[in-house]
Amino acid sequence: MQRFRSEENAVRFLTILGIAVFDGVVILPLVHIDAQIDTILIVGLVGVCFLVSWRMFSKGTERGADLFSFDPNSMSETLSQTITHLKEEIVLIKSDHKNDAKSIQTSMNSFAEKLELDKRIQDYARDSAKQEIDEHIPQLYRYCDETLNMCKNDNEEIPDKVVEKVTELLEEKREKENDGGNTNITTQDKKEFQTDHNDDKISSEDTPASYSGPTDTQKSQKILRMTSTNFSEYRPKSHKLCIVIHNLLKNRQTLGNESNRPNLSEISGLSGVNKSQVKMRLQTLANQGLVTMNKGELSRIEFELSSNLDKLFNPVLENQREGGMESFFLIQQAKRHHLDNEDYFEVLKQDITIEQPDCISIPILDNESFDVLNSVAIEIESPQEIQSHPDQVKSNMTKSLQWFFKVEMWCYEDSQDKLQDILDEIDPQQRDRITIMPVHKDGSLA
C-alpha cells in the first residue's frame, strides 16, 4: 500500500501536534513539579505525546487500510480508468450502431433491387410463355385433328376428357374466327367432330368391312368407366351383404320401424353366411367407407349403408330425366329385378354430351369378380317417349350393343306393342340381343 503524500502528512502533523499540546496542558496541572523545570517538562511531555500520537495514528491508519483494503489513490485511479473505458465502449457502441444501420440500409436496398429484378424476370417469363403458346396454338389444333382422325380410322374409343378438351379448343377457335383471328384449322372442325365422334360411338358407315367390333378389354374399360364404383375394392361377396342390408332397411321402412338398424345376426341369417365371415366383410366395407357401424340397443352393433352406397341402392329422381315419375317408377322396378338376382345395378347420371344407357346391370361371376362382359344396358322408355320420339327409341335400342352383351327396354305394358313395332324394324341379328321388359301398373313384370 502506498504512503500518504506530503500534503497529507502536513495535515496529519498539525492534527497530532494539536492533540499532543492538548494532552500536555491537561496532564500538567495534575503533576506537581518545581517551577524551574516547568518549561522543560512541558516541552518534553508534549514531545512524548506527539510521538505516541503520531505512532498510534500511523499504525491505526495503516491497519484500517489493510483491514478494509481501501486505498483512496488506487480507487481514484481505478474509477478514472473505468470512466475512460466506459467512454471508449460508448464510442465503439455508437460506431457499431452506425455500421449496423448502414448494413441494414444496404440490405434493404439490395432486397428492393432483388424484388424489382424478380418482377422483371416474371414479367419476361410470362410474356415469353404467352408468345410461345400463341405460336404453338395452331400446332396444337392440328395435333388434336390428327388424333381424332387417327382414333376414328382405327376405331378406337376417345376418352371423355379428350373429347371435352377438344370441344373446348374448337369452341375457342370458333370464337377467334368470329373475332377475325387467323388459325390453321378449317371452320368445319367442330361440326365434323360432333358428327363423326358423337361421344365414342363408332358408326356403321365409318366402320371398315374387316372391323369385328371393340375388343373385350375395350368393352370392359368402357363399361367400368360409366360406373361410380371402384371395382378393385368392391367385391361380389361384399355386394351381396349390401343387398341384404338394403332389403332389411327397406322392410323396416315399410313397417315404419326405422329406428333399429340391421345387426350382425340378422345379416348373417338372411345372407346364409356365418357370423365370422359377415363380420370380416362388413369390417372391410366399413374401412372403405361403404357402410357405417353404430352401437344400438343392448349394445349390439348395427349397420347401415353409407351415403355414397345409399345413392347407389336408392336412386333419386333427377329433374332433367325425361318421363318424370313414370320413368322413375320403371327404374325402381328394374332395380328391384336385378338386385333380386344379386346383380350390380346403377342408375347413370344423365348427360346429353355422353352417349350411354339410362342404367346398367353387371352380373356376378363368382365371389371375387363381376362378369363385366355380360353386362346389360337398360333403357327406360315412358309412354310419351315411345309415342313422340320413335326414332330416338330405335336409336336407344342399338346404340349400346357394341359395348354391352344385351339391351333391356323397360316400358309399361300399355306401350309394349308400340315398342315391339319399333323393335321389328331393327336388323334380326341385333334384335336377338334386345329384350322388352313390360311392367304392370302394380310393378310386376308382364
Image: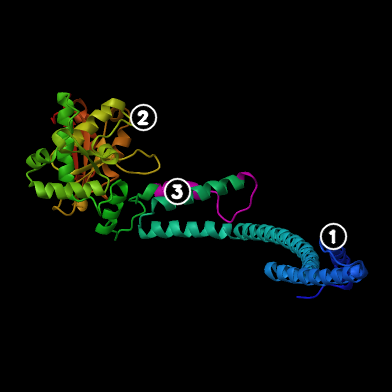
Mark 1 or 3, closer to the camera: 1
At numbered mark 3, what does the secondary structure look like: helix, strand or loop?
helix
From the viewer's perspective, tell me whether residue 44 is left or right of residue 410: right
Q: Which mark is residue 198?
A: none
Vertical position of residue 421 compared to residue 83: above or below: above
Residue 272: x and y, percent? Answer: 6, 44
Q: Amino acid at mark 1?
A: Pro
| 446 in magenta | no
Whole-percent x, y for residue 73 in the image: 80, 70
Label 2 – label 3 distance at C-alpha: 24 Å
Q: Mark 2 — residue?
A: 319
Taking the view exactly as shown, the residue that stands out farthest to the bottom is 2
Circle 3 packing at 10 Å, graded few (<14), some (14-19), many (20+), is few
Q: Which mark is residue 29?
A: 1
Q: Earlier in the sequence, mark 1 or mark 3?
A: 1
Closer to the chain start, of discs 2 and 3, is: 3
User: Dot 1, how many residues are within 10 Å of its Cα: few (below 14), some (14-19), or many (20+)?
Assistant: few
Figure check: 336 above or below 191: above
Question: Residue 296 is drawn in which quadrant?
Answer: top left
Q: Is 185 one of the magenta-colored residues?
A: yes
- For image coordinates 32% across by 28% down, the residue present is 388
Q: Mark 1 to mark 2: distance in Å? A: 140 Å
- The x and y percentages for residue 293 are 22, 41
What span is in magenta?
178-198
